[in-house]
């Protein structure tokens, strides 16, 4: 099948080509993001492959459909950037990669916790400059601390497993209970109880209308003084302005994020020679107790291999007319029945 791959980076090309032996599909790589202006690049391509910052809104999908596209293959799990209703109306099938390596994101989450706590990033800079003072690098033992995990699906569960190994107590909140997480000794509680009793709070639920700005002024007020807040899920789970106020007052003592509400203007690009216009982001990076990575939690060899292999298999299923278990509409029908 002829596939237009948008938002291509060198690593996308490397892993997708490796997953497509004998050129089973004709992959054509485009660097620009998909949007209304770039959709024309996909003229005559029955399949379009997109990532998190590509915008498949209704007008873009209409353009793609008029040019012959019948399949959108997301090479990620989240699909908040695709207008599913418009796709269904236009007869475009949408497939995704629901799981590729929950370990990748969970391990990065724990990496942020450890780095923030022991200030490893700051210590590294000091040592490089010949400053061996440890003043200001004081951390705390994770052993015995209480971690609140919001969202205990695939990633939240592994975060719980790892932190259990550190000797942490686990408080959890989810709309469904995960028995594997309960087996770890985690206690499911209401959000208010999780906020009030956690030393560290880490977010692993999807971005939905219900979870948008889950961490806002009211939530922060309920938290312990000196909380560590971690978000490797989606930026808009956090009201960034409220979190900045929390950091200024000292209520939030540490913030570690791999995702940011307005990240699509920044992340995945080298802007080192440009003037960043986002004042909220610029304020965030002035805090010494804030650690930001640019949406790289998923970025391991295993995850990229799984993403590419599943994407190619999804495209093959569609081409051969086989039912695809990763078709979003089909998954939503199954979820609605549960
Ligand atoms: P998952 O579907 O396995 O788990 C999500 C959990 O959130 C489920 O248990 C679900 O019941 C729960 N949930 C849904 N609505 C909720 C609500 N209102 N309140 C509390 N919990 C709720 O997904 P996953 O694979 O564990 O991924 C979690 C999130 O991680 C994804 O939604 C995605 O946004 C993010 N993610 C980030 C990266 C990255 O590179 N930073 C990579 C992959 C995924």
Image: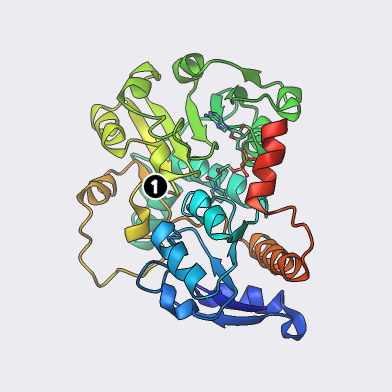
Query: Quick check: 36 above or below 249?
Result: below
Q: How is the image coloured?
A: rainbow
Q: Position of residue 162 (x, y in %)?
A: 66, 38
Q: Give the quarter of the figure containing the N terminus.
A: bottom right
The foreground one among 266 and 37 is 37
The picture quadrant where one finds residue 308 is: bottom right
What residue is shown with label 1? Answer: 291
Count of number-bearing discs: 1
- Taking 15 as reference, is 316 left or right? right
Q: Residue at x 73, y 71 (%)?
A: 319
Quadrant hosting ligand 1? top right
**Helix, strand or loop under label 1:** strand
The picture quadrant where one finds residue 299 is: bottom right
Observer able to see residue 7: no
Q: Position of residue 302 (x, y in %)?
A: 69, 61
The foreground one among 88 and 197 is 88
Q: Residue at x 59, y 52 (%)?
A: 77
The foreground one among 29 and 109 is 29
Query: Quick check: 87 above or below 179?
Result: below
Q: Give the quarter of the figure containing the C terminus.
A: top right
Q: Position of residue 50 (x, y in %)?
A: 53, 65
Q: Position of residue 261 (x, y in %)?
A: 36, 46
Sort mark 1 into few (<14), some (14-19) or many (20+) by Cα contacts within 10 Å.
many
- Taking 92 as reference, is 338 left or right? right
Q: Residue at x 49, y 16 (%)?
A: 197
Residue closest to the far bottom: 22
* Label 1 beta carbon less than 8 Å to ligand 1: no
Observer able to see residue 183: yes
């Amino acid at each position: 099948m002829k596939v237009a791959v948008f938002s291509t980076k060198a690593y996308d090309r490397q892993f997708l080509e490796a997953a497509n032996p004998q050129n089973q599909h004709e992959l054509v790589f485009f660097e620009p993001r998909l949007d209304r202006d770039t959709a024309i690049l996909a003229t005559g391509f029955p399949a379009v492959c997109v990532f998190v910052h590509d915008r498949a809104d209704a007008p873009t999908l209409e353009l793609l459909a008029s040019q012959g596209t019948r399949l959108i293959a997301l090479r990620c799990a989240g699909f908040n950037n695709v207008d599913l209703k418009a796709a269904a109306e236009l007869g475009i099938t949408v497939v995704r990669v629901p799981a590729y390596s929950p370990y990748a994101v969970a391990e990065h989450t724990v990496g942020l916790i450890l780095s923030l706590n022991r200030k490893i990033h700051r210590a590294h800079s000091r040592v490089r400059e010949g400053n061996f003072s440890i003043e200001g690098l004081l951390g705390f033992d994770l052993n015995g601390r209480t971690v609140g995990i919001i969202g205990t699906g695939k990633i939240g569960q592994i975060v719980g497993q790892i932190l259990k190994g550190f000797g942490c107590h686990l408080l959890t909140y989810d709309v469904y209970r995960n028995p594997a997480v309960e087996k770890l000794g985690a206690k499911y509680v209401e959000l208010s109880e999780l906020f009030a009793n956690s030393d560290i709070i880490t977010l692993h639920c999807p971005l939905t209308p219900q979870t948008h700005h889950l961490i806002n002024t009211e939530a922060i007020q309920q938290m312990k003084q000196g909380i560590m807040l971690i978000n490797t899920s989606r930026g808009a789970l956090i009201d960034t302005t409220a979190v900045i106020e929390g950091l200024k007052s000292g209520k939030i003592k540490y913030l570690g994020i791999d995702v940011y509400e307005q990240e699509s203007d920044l992340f995945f690009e080298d802007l080192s020679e440009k003037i960043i216009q986002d004042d909220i982001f610029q304020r965030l990076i002035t805090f010494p107790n804030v650690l930001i990575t640019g949406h790289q939690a998923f970025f391991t060899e295993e995850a990229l291999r799984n993403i590419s292999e599943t994407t190619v298999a999804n495209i093959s299923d569609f081409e051969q007319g086989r039912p695809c278990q990763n078709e979003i509409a089909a998954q939503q029908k199954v979820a609605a029945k549960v």
